[in-house]
Image (spheres, rainbow, N blue to C red):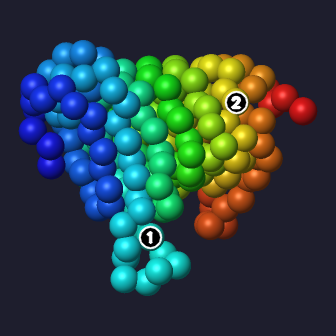
Amino acid sequence: GSAVNSSYSGQTTLAGGITRFEGDLPVGANSAFGNSAAPIVLTAGRDSGIPEIPLDTRLWAETDTVISRNITVAGNGVGTIRFGSSDGIQTVTMNGTLTLQRQLNLEFGQAAPNVLGAVAGFNGTITGPGSLTDHAGNYSSQRLSASNNYSGGTWLRSGVWELGHDAALGSGPVIAESFSPDATTTYVGSLSA
């Protein structure tokens, strides 16, 4: 885990593994990842022992959280932001810019059946050539408010997607798929052609 209210001022780069944190991540104020305006970088270029499979880097918010710092997903692997405590019930608001150089997975803790679990609100812009993939449960909600211009595509697997703008899902392909026969995906808003 990461300590609350660290005061270092350099950039934070996470390279493989899971980093759990609690509390908000403001810009320019003490937080789990220091006192900085620099983006938090998820880079997964470390060798996993199998050259074709680099390690993922996971940033895991364990409590209700407001993330105002920018986040960049870079390197050779996949970045994952996990929302949801062990009971899966949590609200995370992301106000900073997400820059996707690679794939970003959104992962959600599992709430009890038929209970709305994690709610992730993205108020900042999502940009870059990378892709966005959800690993959400049926009872999660993703809210994308901005006009986003990431171009690597969006893979929607389940849950509720609230789209606050016609270009909320970027400029790449949108693919709806499911790993489970009982999974549902609901869209609130509209998609641009």
- Image position of 56 with respect to 90: above or below: below
At horizontal 70% and vertical 30% (from top left) the residue drawn is: 149
Q: Which residue is mark 1?
A: 54
Which picture quadrant has residue 169?
Answer: top right
- In the rendered view, tell whether residue 189 sits above or below residue 110: above
Is residue 57 in sight in this rendering?
A: yes
Q: Quadrant of residue 67?
A: top left
Q: Nearer the viewer, residue 193 or 86?
A: 193
Residue at x-position 63% and y-position 54%: 157
Observer-nearest of 30 and 91: 30
Residue located 58% across and 31% down the image:
126
Kind of residue at badge 1: Pro
Amino acid type for the residue under numbered disc 2: Asn
Total numbered circles:
2
- Residue at the front extreme, as displayed: 10
The answer to whether one can see residue 156 in this image is: no
Q: Secondary structure at mark 1?
A: loop
- Find numbered disc 2 in the image and state the secondary structure of the residue it sits on: loop
Q: Residue at x 21, y 41 (%)?
A: 21
Q: Residue 167: image x %, image y %?
A: 75, 26
- In-image side of 82 versus 147 (left or right): left
* Vertical side of 24 occupied by 62: above or below: below
Q: In this image, 139 relative to 126: left or right?
A: left
Camera-side residue of 124 and 51: 51
Residue bearing the label numbered 2: 149
Task: Provide residue 12's location: percent of width, then percent of height.
Answer: 27, 39
- Which class describes the residues within 10 Å of circle 1: few (<14), some (14-19), or many (20+)? some
Disc 1 and disc 2: Cα gap in Å?
26 Å
Asked if residue 169 lies left or right of residue 82, the reply is right
